[in-house]
Image: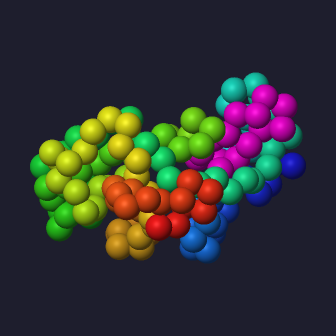
């Protein structure tokens, strides 16, 4: 059961528009990036599960000195978002200014190929009611 839990698999799900994480069958923790062994309990009893793309902001900052490849985006806002099962992921915030954000704000995860390294994550405020079950506006 060591194969099938790679970053390449994760990227394949993203290409399909699915937000998949690895879930441990022993301790029930969910995590990304994917690993062939649970980082919490060492189990190899793992499976992929799809989770909602709706999460909440736990931290954010405005970047003025960008990473290589992101110069055209600067200044930009990066947020750390917590999703179902405690999974956390950073993403670039679109559709909001720094003053619009707050800890606990509901946001929606989207995927973009507009990056020199492939996919990256776009976070947009979930204003106007985003369905928690579908992750769709």
Residue 136 vertical placement versus 98 (above, below): below
Q: Nearer the viewer, residue 2 or 137?
A: 137
Residue 41: image location, x then y, percent: 76, 25
Residue 77: image location, x then y, percent: 23, 51
Residue under the point 79% across and 49% down: 47
Residue 82: image location, x then y, percent: 48, 40
Residue 33 drawn in magenta: yes
Give the image quarter of residue 121. bottom left
Q: Residue furthest top?
A: 41
Q: Nearer the viewer, residue 32 or 107?
A: 107
Q: Which residues are magenta?
A: 21-34
Residue under the point 50% across and 53% down: 54
Q: Residue furthest front?
A: 128
Colour scheme shown = rainbow
Residue 94 vertical placement versus 28 (above, below): below
Give the image quarter of residue 27. top right
């Amino acid at each position: 059961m060591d194969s099938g839990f790679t970053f390449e698999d994760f990227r394949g799900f993203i290409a399909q528009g699915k937000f998949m994480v690895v879930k441990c069958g022993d301790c029930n923790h969910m995590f990304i990036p994917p690993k062939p062994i649970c980082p919490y309990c060492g189990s190899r009893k793992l499976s992929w599960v799809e989770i909602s793309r709706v999460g909440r902001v736990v931290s954010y900052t405005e970047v003025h000195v960008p990473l290589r490849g992101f110069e055209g985006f600067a200044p930009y806002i990066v947020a750390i978002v917590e999703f179902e099962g405690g999974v956390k992921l950073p993403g670039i915030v679109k559709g909001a200014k720094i003053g619009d954000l707050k800890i606990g704000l509901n946001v929606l995860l989207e995927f973009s190929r507009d990056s020199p390294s492939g996919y990256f994550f776009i976070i947009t405020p979930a204003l106007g009611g985003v369905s928690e079950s579908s992750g769709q506006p």
